[in-house]
Amino acid sequence: MNKWNKVVLPAVVLTAVLAAGGSILSANAEQSDGTINKGVYIGSVDVSGMTKEQAEEAVKGEVSKMESASITLQVGTDTATATAGELGAKWANTDVVEQALELGKAGNLIKRYKENKDLQHEPAKFELEYKADAATARNYVETKCKAFEKEAQEGSLTRENGEFEVVPGVIGQKINVEDSVYAITNYMNSEFKGESGTVTLSVNQDKPKFSDEELSKVEDVLGTYTTYYGSTSGRNQNVERGAELLNGHLLYPGESFSVTDAVVPFNAENGYEMAPSYESGRVVDSYGGGICQVSTTLYNALLLAELDVTERSNHTMIVTYVEPSMDAAIAEGLMDLVFVNNTDAPIYLAGSAYGGELTFTIYGHETRPADRVVEYVSETLKTFSAEGVALYANPNQNVGYLQQTQSALTGKEARLWKYVTENGETTKTQINTSYYQAAPVGYEVGTATADPNQAAAISNAIAANDLNAVQAAISGGAATPQTQPSTDAQTPPTDPNQPPTTDAPQTEPNQTPSDPQTPPADPNQPPATDAPQTEPTGQPPIEAPTDPNTANAGEQTP
């Protein structure tokens, strides 16, 4: 080949290319300026022949549609549904319209030629890209998904026909917000294509503190105690209602229980009736009268179970259904019986009141030695009486009304001892001390009269607690009221050798069975035994007299 051939051939090829390109460029030039070439798509939108403004409007509609795509959020065992927009999906490559507009129309000749040549064979598609707004995703997780969080629910026990059945606990779930926001933003930035999808949020399990296996340990009787009731129908109802409210409570190790909180409020709406109770040194009718027999019976079961009693109060005046210092009075806002489960397993309170017999049994896991014998003995330190009578005005009754409302009550100072025999050795521990005030015979006196002189005489007699003067005023006599001896005499002098009144146990040195301090057997005390015993079923009811006007017809209650 000669020199001219070598020069002419590339020139011919270049001429051919320019000729072809010129025809293509000429064809493009026929389109109006500022429009997108044919065969160009943005997402699924054909933007061929559109101006920039037209293409942007069309693409925004596509973006809106894609941001409405449904995203399923897996939240542990639950699911939630949100739109991509609600999770923070935003159109990221907003310059894609400009890119589409420049395709085949921008750049050097070769670039334009190639892009237009490619469009003749297949369409060009620009993908829409999205990014996540982390703040929007976080807000959705914290405001919407938090509703799917669940607290762990401890298992429980039911008791039917003398058998326990375990009710399994429920595993809770708590959302890990940081990890969940990352999962959402990562999905939007890398996987989301404008269609529906699923994102699994990060969830931490919140397991119950105690397993079903630990609940199954509750099968042993740790302590049981029975007292007997049978008085006014109102008092009987209150005793039975109190037992019902306390029955079935489950306490896990370390948990504290307030008896007062469990049985209040003392009103008709909560199932209580009016019955005699102690209030300010006298017997009055109030809702819940008799509830302290319930707390007292439970207290003795707790003692036998050797649970930690952290709060206990004695009655203001003596009761008859237990020995002194073995009672536990409650009054809303004033007195409570509080105890803690100090064992290694849950405990279950079983309470029942039927047919005059009130029983509480503490079930749990027995870990005490088989030869451990526990006995509680009441010791009365002092007794004293109140002199005279106590008179109370009743303005709703006419003069002439004179009704005995309570009998005289002996005051006592007492303490409770705990005897524990184990491995042949006996220890003696003081559990509490109690002081019960003495009370004289009480009368209600009618004061309604139109005679001012008689009214004054009655009033003076009541103020002086002078029953003879009251009777004289009723009969129209002019007897001068006689002042009864001061009731201060009923308070015994303080014994400097006596320990202070407290529920804190005070332990004495070990005592042997021959220790002279060990009290003789009391036929009314339950026998010492490994397993706590109830009172003998043949024992007659040790309950206040049926007559509601007697002194021991109720306890101190709200």
Image: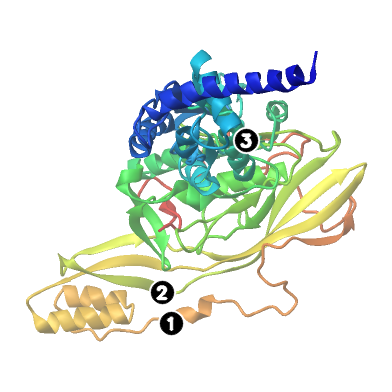
Counting residues from the start of the chain, the first of labels 3 and 1 encountered is 3
Viewer-nearest residue: 319 or 160: 160
Task: Look at discs 2 and 3 and give the one toward the viewer.
Answer: 3
- Structural crowding at the residue carrying mark 3, measured as other residues with C-alpha within 10 Å and reported as few (<14), some (14–19) or many (≥20): some
The answer to whether 58 is drawn above or below residue 176 in the figure is above
Q: In the rendered image, which quarter is residue 305 located in?
A: top right
Q: Position of residue 424 (x, y in %)?
A: 92, 43
Please say whether residue 288 is visible from this viewpoint: yes
* 284 displayed left or right of 305: left
* Tag 2 residue: 388
Q: Given the current orientation, which residue lies at the most extreme left position?
A: 450
Element at badge 3? strand
Residue type, numbered disc 3 = Val
**Residue 485 bears which disc, if any?**
1
The answer to whether 255 is drawn above or below residue 468 in the figure is above
Q: In the rendered image, which quarter is residue 283 located in?
A: bottom left
Viewer-nearest residue: 63 or 120: 120
* 142 displayed left or right of 274: right
Residue type, numbered disc 1 = Pro
Residue type, numbered disc 2 = Gly
What separation in Å lies between label 2 and label 3 (alpha carbons)? 74 Å
* Tag 3 residue: 203
